[in-house]
Image (spheres, rainbow, N blue to C red):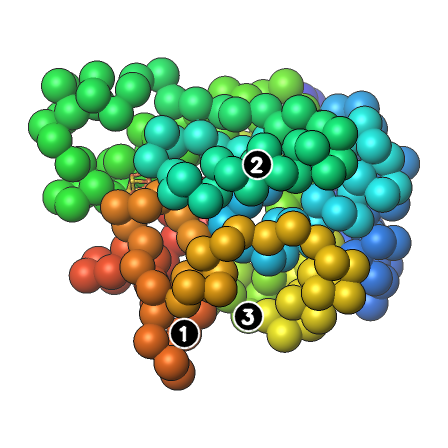
Amino acid sequence: MLLNQRSGTALAIETAARCLEDASPKEIVRWALETYAPRIVLACSFGGATGIAALDVALKLDRTTPVYYLDTGLLFPETYALVERIAAVYGIDPVPVRPAASVAEQAAVFGPELWKRDPDACCSLRKLEPQSDFLAGYDAWITGIRRDQTEWRSDAPVVQWDAKFDLVKVNPFARWDEAKVWAYVRFHNLPYNALHDAGYPSLGCAPCTRPIAAGEDVRAGRWPGFGKTECGLHR
Ligand code: SF4
C-alpha cells in the first residue's frame, strides 16, 4: 500500500473511532459491516461471554458474517461443545483455524508440553501464526476484547488499525465491563461455555487455564505460574 493511501486509511480509522466511541456495540458492528463486508470476519474464542455477545450482535445484523475460532487442538471439551451449539442455534459454520502442526508434531520438534516451558512460543505456533495466515484474506476483524480485561487492553479504541495482522480491528464491546456483558448474555438467553458456571470466567487452552477463587481477577486463571496475561493476539 502506498504511503499516502496508508495515511488516509489511518486518518479514516481514527475518525471512525472518535465518532463511534459512544456508540452501542450494535451501532459499531453495523458500521463495520457496512464498511467492510464481505471482507470482514468475527473472531470468537467460545471461551468468554463477550465473544458470544459480539457474535450475537453481528449475526443478528447479518447472518452471513463469517465466524472463526482458533482451534489449537487443546481446547476444553466444553468449548468444542459450545461451538457445535452455537452453530446449531444460529445456523452457521464457524471456521476452525488450526496450526500447521498437530500437538504431537509440535512435541516431536519442540519437546512435549511446550506450554509448560515457553507459552509465548507455543501461542505463537498455535495461535498467532495461524491467525496471521487466516486474516490475510480480510480487511477487518471484529473482536470481543474489553478495556477492563487486561492492562494491554485498557486503552483499546472501538476501531483501530491492527499493525500486527495488517487490517482494521473492531472492538464493539471495548467500553463494556464483565457485568454488563453478562447482563446482555442472560437477557438474550444466549448459549455460553458451561465451564463459566464452574469457576472459569475466561477460557483458553485447557493446559493453560485453571478455575479462579472468589475475589480473584477474572483472568487470573490464564497461564497460571507465568506473568503472561495475553496470548499475543491483542498486543
Ligand atoms: Fe499453547 Fe497454552 Fe498458548 Fe494454548 S494457551 S497455544 S496451550 S501456550
Percent coordinates x, y for residue 204 in the rendering: 40, 48
- Vertical order, 56 against 121 (above or below): below
Q: Amino acid at mark 3?
A: Asp
Gap between marks 2 and 3 measured at Cα: 25 Å
Q: Secondary structure at mark 2?
A: helix
At mark 3, the secondary structure is loop
Amino acid, disc 2: Val
What separation in Å lies between label 2 and label 1 (alpha carbons)? Answer: 26 Å
Residue 43 seen? no
Q: Quadrant of the rendered structure where residue 139 is? A: top right
**CA distance for labels 3 and 1:** 11 Å
Q: Are marks 2 and 1 in contact (CB under 8 Å)?
A: no
Marks 2 and 1, the one that precedes in the sequence: 2
Three-letter amino acid code at the position of disc 1: Asp
Left or right: 228, with 134 as reference point: left
> Quick one: label 3, few (<14), some, or many (20+) residues within 10 Å?
some
The residue that disc 2 covers is 83
Q: Quadrant of ligand 1?
A: top left
Question: Which residue was labeled with disc 3?
Answer: 148
Comes first in the chain, label 3 or label 1: 3
Q: Tell me if I can see residue 79 in this picture.
A: yes
Q: Residue at x 30, y 18 (%)?
A: 101
Within-10-Å neighbours for mark 1: few <14, some 14–19, many 20+: few
Q: Position of residue 83 (x, y in %)?
A: 57, 36
Q: Quadrant of residue 113?
A: top left
For label 1, the residue is 217
